[in-house]
Amino acid sequence: MLQFGIDLGGTKTEIIALDSEGNERLRRRAPTPRESYPDILNTILTLVTDAASELNEPYTLGLGIPGALSYKTGLVKNANTTCLIGQDLKGDIERSLKHPVVIANDADCLALSEATDGAGAGYDSVFAVIIGTGCGGGWVVNGKVISGPNAIAGEWGHNPLSWRTDEDGDFPCYCGLTGCQETLLSGSGIRLQAQFETGLDQSAETWVKAAEAGDPQAQQVLLHHHKRLAKALAAVINLMDPHAIVLGGGASNIESIYRIVPELWGEWVFSDSVETPLLKSQYGDSSGVRGAAWLGRSAYSK
């Protein structure tokens, strides 16, 4: 049986089909129409039906979303693609396809992918972080995604930044609070924070390219971002002490993170040394979609 996985991202929606050995049989992407729930649903259904028609084999289906399903209602909650909130995404997909789907948070899918056969393979516990359009975390222990009674395990992006100083912005978040780590650490957070510090409104990509070219102002913007990320991850290490931390999402491609953050986080970690490796996801921005496929397989095999 094939494993279909879908990653519903802020800018793109991707489907992958893996065989039982983890070999890729198909991969497709489509833009995410993030302002319209009916259009998002139609994008997902089209990707699945086209893949099923082309491959013509039985399949399991897993879906990673930027949010979670409420255990109380079964509806989507906590999604930074806000048109998903309150929608019966699982029911709508299953009624349309007449096929079961397993849905999990996208950071959980990233964590499962990297812990299964990615950068975190072989570690007893992996905390994985998406720093892309939003910022969230997933937690895998001994190959199993950890999920608590509120379906928010690893939802670290909606904690306030620890050890905050006046140089850190305090921006409103879509969740209704201010100062969430998501507003400071995500790709869009780099833009907001840089505007707060410099008065210039430029994309995160522009700041990164300028820093790599040696621009001192841009390098300072990234240094401040990395310092905030070091604080946020130090709080995770103090609480959970994971065997490895893996970063995914667009901002995880900033190479200076992996050098600077481990140099800084010892100031806030309650230990005489910090042995935790900070790793870049092996499968890049496609790691979540692989994790969604593994998620579907593991759920169907119960």
Image (cartoon, rainbow, N blue to C red):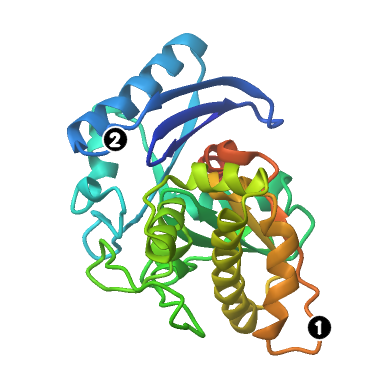
Mark 2 and mark 1 lie on one chain; the one further toward the N terminus is 2
Residue 300 spot, x, y in % from top left: 50, 42
Q: Is residue 265 visible?
A: yes
Q: State the residue position of label 2.
A: 94
In the image, residue 143 above or below residue 45? below
Q: State the residue position of label 1.
A: 273
Q: Nearer the viewer, mark 2 or mark 1?
A: 1
Q: Quadrant of residue 99?
A: top left
| Disc 1 residue type (three-letter) | Ser
**Is 79 on the left-hand or right-hand side of 276?**
left
In the image, residue 272 above or below residue 289? below
Q: Residue at x 59, y 42 (%)?
A: 209
Q: Residues within 10 Å of mark 2 (few under 14, many from 20)?
A: some
Q: Is residue 290 visible?
A: no
| Front residue of this view, candidates 106 and 1 | 106
Q: Residue at x 26, y 43 (%)?
A: 89
